[in-house]
Image (cartoon, helix red, strand yellow):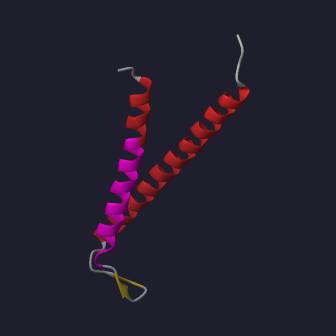
Amino acid sequence: MDIEWGSLGGVLGVSLGITVVVVVMFSLGIAAWSRAEAYGERSGATRRGVLHRGSGTVAAAIAMVCFAACLAVAAYGIDLIIPD
């Protein structure tokens, strides 16, 4: 039995990179979701003299995009694991 260390290192690098990307995307989604809730609680309120009417909607949209990206990566990984 022979191990191709270069291929093993490549798989390790890609796996580590994708893991970091998914964790960061999920964290950004959680942060955006909490920001959307905070804007929803004080709808119409001003912050530092600037009116943020659509910011809650934008933050919620960013959160959904982040969560969708995490879901897509997980679905692709499951598709790779499960044989056809």
Does residue 80 lie above or below 70 as drawn? above
Instruction: Give the dominant element type of the magenta stretch: helix, strand or loop.
Output: helix
Left/right of residue 52 with respect to residue 27 in the rendered view: left
Residue at (39%, 20%) from the top-left corner?
83
Let me know if residue 59 is in the magenta part.
Answer: yes
Does residue 81 lie above or below 11 as drawn? above
> Could you say where residue 60 lies in the image, as x and y percent from the top left?
32, 62
Residue at (40%, 49%) from the top-left corner?
69
Residue at (39%, 65%) from the top-left corner?
35
- In this orientation, which residue lies closer to the viewer: 32 or 67? 67
> Could you say where residue 53 lies in the image, as x and y percent from the top left?
28, 78
> Could you say where residue 6 lies in the image, as x and y percent from the top left?
71, 31
For residue 10, what is the image quadrant? top right
For residue 61, what is the image quadrant? bottom left
Q: Which residues are magenta?
A: 53-72
Residue at (30%, 73%) from the top-left corner?
42
- In this orientation, which residue lies closer to the viewer: 81 or 5? 5
> Could you say where residue 5 lies in the image, as x and y percent from the top left?
72, 26
